Image: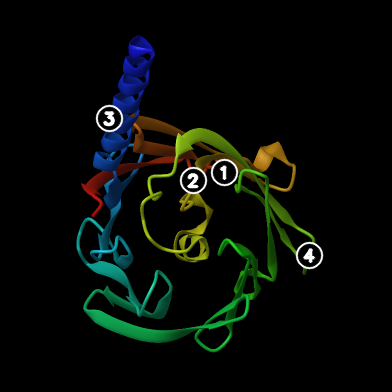
């Protein structure tokens, strides 16, 4: 009996150690550097800022020469649902600013006057009028598998890697990740490995990854069009709160 107790005690310590390691490894993407693979020089940057609840509050993109920048700021009340989004940009000395209120009515998220998103019980986007009346489909694992368009019957089909999303500890609803970042950065689950228009593999864009432990270090995209070539995103992180 004593030996059995010691076995269970050791197992409990091991489990606690694993949980502590996981808690200490909670990270948030803070800077993404995008570069074209022809020469490896940076093409643009994106910084991400968070509050003390790990909610995304500001995203800033800018070019290497510093002559342009785009900023998206999110304002929250309670919980992780934003109530206002503020856009601002600078381009060769010219500035622009816009604010949109965000309202929640049943299963609808209404941004501004007409941008309407339909969400499910898990706050995933299942419909979006501003994206050509798009309908979003998910598998049993919660991954977005395809997007279809009611207007023309087109579709975008996705496959997935075994690389976990670097945004998994960011405290925002799933619909907001797609609305702000498109399909390349899911809030949960795994990162996409490819997407194609319809079932035509000739239009397939592929993504490969390198990692530091459990975290994405780089993501390389090979675009379907030969003219677009390939590009690499390099991630830097801060600790989550």
Residue 177 drawn at (x, y percent): 46, 60
Residue at image mark 3: 17
Residue at image mark 1: 225
Q: Residues within 10 Å of mark 1 (few under 14, many from 20)?
A: few
Q: Are marks 3 and 4 in contact (CB under 8 Å)?
A: no
- Of badges 3 and 4, nearer the viewer stands 3
Q: Secondary structure at mark 2?
A: loop
Spatial separation of the CA atoms under disc 3 and disc 4: 53 Å
Residue 214 drawn at (x, y percent): 35, 33
Residue 228's tag is 2
Q: Are marks 1 and 2 in contact (CB under 8 Å)?
A: yes
Which color scheme is applied? rainbow
Residue 234 drawn at (x, y percent): 30, 41
Residue at image mark 4: 152
In terms of sequence position, does the residue under pointer 2 or pointer 4 come before the other? 4
For the point 30% across and 60% down, the residue is: 54
In terms of sequence position, does the residue under pointer 3 or pointer 1 come before the other? 3
- Of badges 4 and 1, nearer the viewer stands 4
Q: Residue 110 falls in which quadrant of the image?
A: bottom right
Q: Secondary structure at mark 4?
A: loop
């Amino acid at each position: 009996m004593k030996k059995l107790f010691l076995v269970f005690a050791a197992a409990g310590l091991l489990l606690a150690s694993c949980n502590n390691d996981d808690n200490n490894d909670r990270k948030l993407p803070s800077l993404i550097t995008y570069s074209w693979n022809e020469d490896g020089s940076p093409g643009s940057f994106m910084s991400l800022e968070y509050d003390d609840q790990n909610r995304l509050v500001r995203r800033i993109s800018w070019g290497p020469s510093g002559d342009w920048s785009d900023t998206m700021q999110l304002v929250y009340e309670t919980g992780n649902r934003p109530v206002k989004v503020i856009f601002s940009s600078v381009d060769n000395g010219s500035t622009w600013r816009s604010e949109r209120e965000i309202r929640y009515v049943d299963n609808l998220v209404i941004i501004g006057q007409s941008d309407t998103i339909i969400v499910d019980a898990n706050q995933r986007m299942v419909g979006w009028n501003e994206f050509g009346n798009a309908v979003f489909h998910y598998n049993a694992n919660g991954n977005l598998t395809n997007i279809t368009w009611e207007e023309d019957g087109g579709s975008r089909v996705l496959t997935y890697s075994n690389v976990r999303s670097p945004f998994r500890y960011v405290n925002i609803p799933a619909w907001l990740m797609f609305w702000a970042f498109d399909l390349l950065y899911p809030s949960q689950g795994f990162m996409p490995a490819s997407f194609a228009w319809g079932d035509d593999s000739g239009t397939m864009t592929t993504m490969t990854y390198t990692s530091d432990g459990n975290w994405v270090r780089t993501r390389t995209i090979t675009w379907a069009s030969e003219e677009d070539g390939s590009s690499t995103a390099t991630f830097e992180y801060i600790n989550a709160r």
